[in-house]
Image: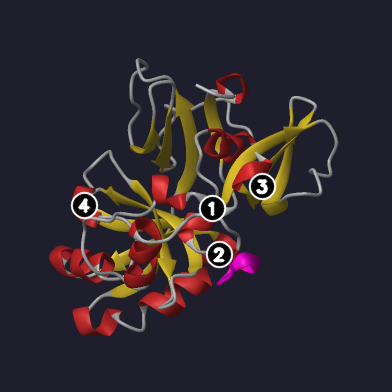
Amino acid sequence: MKNIEYLTFGSHHLHVLCALHLKGDFDAVMQLLQGQVTSDCKLLSTGHGQPSALCNEKGYILCNFDIVIHNDLVLVIIENNSQDIFIKEITKFAPFFKVSVEPFHTDIVGWIRRPEEERVTGEHAIIESAAAILSLVLLDSSQNEVSDIDQLPHWDIGRKVLGDHTIRSNDQGMFRPHDLNQTAHRVSFSKGCFRGQEIIARMEYLGKQKKQTQLIIHPERKAPSIFQVIGATLEAHELFFSSCMGLNDQF
């Protein structure tokens, strides 16, 4: 797998993330999410979450997040700076399903492991490949299965290595999923309607994709000027890692 040597296996304390509990009847919560988010929530199960997104009616991404089922609760794991965007958008429809959004207090750890390694308690696999599994682990104060926690950017680099390029709150409404290759992990084209689905599906089946986003690893902080950098450039291994969007023939 390309760039697999830059994966940092182990645990990563994700202090920039928070958990939101969608409180209500389980089936109603699933129905609410299924009509709004880009992923297929019917594929969720205990231990297996999914990356997802909320888009507006024109198919532009409003926020990225992960969805997990934890102790029979449906939780959205999202960056602190983006939670207000998610809450604002989902509460437009939540009352029709008798669903509310409440904070869920937990420690969130990113766990990058090899497929043959044993799972840990509270683990939710988010992205799986032949080389690595990226999981979220939700901990309470009594758990100590995950140790050696660090706060370096290796979790975000791991997501980039596995092709998951995400937006931050200041990118709200600027990109469609195809622009960032989010169709690989975050969009279902078989689930039926969701907000922005008509335009996103038209781009998938009828459009000609002129741009793409790829991980560029470069020796200096500034990425090559021919690309538009999406999100933050991250530093590790004395190198810099950027999600770069450009024309197809620039890669």
**Closer to the camera: disc 4 or disc 3?**
3
Tell me the number on the disc at residue 72: 4
Give the structural element (helix, strand or loop) at label 1: helix
Give the structural element (helix, strand or loop) at label 2: loop
Where is residue 186? Give x, y as percent.
Answer: 39, 52
Tell me the crowding category of disc 3: few under 14, some 14 to 19, or many 20 or more residues within 10 angstroms, Cα based: many
- Residue wearing tag 1: 180
Front residue of this view, candidates 12 and 229: 229
Cβ atoms at labels 2 and 1 below 8 Å apart: yes
Residues rendered magenta in the picture: 170-175
Amino acid of disc 2:
Phe
Amino acid of disc 3:
Cys
Tell me the crowding category of disc 2: few under 14, some 14 to 19, or many 20 or more residues within 10 angstroms, Cα based: some
Tell me the number on the disc at residue 149: none
Front residue of this view, candidates 226 and 69: 226
Where is residue 200? Give x, y as percent.
Answer: 38, 65
Residue 100 visible to an observer of this rendering: yes
Tell me the distance, in whole angstroms, between the alpha carbons under discs 4 and 3.
38 Å
Residue displayed at 60% across by 46% down? 248
Residue displayed at 41% across by 36% down? 135
Where is residue 22? Give x, y as percent.
Answer: 31, 66
Give the structural element (helix, strand or loop) at label 4: loop
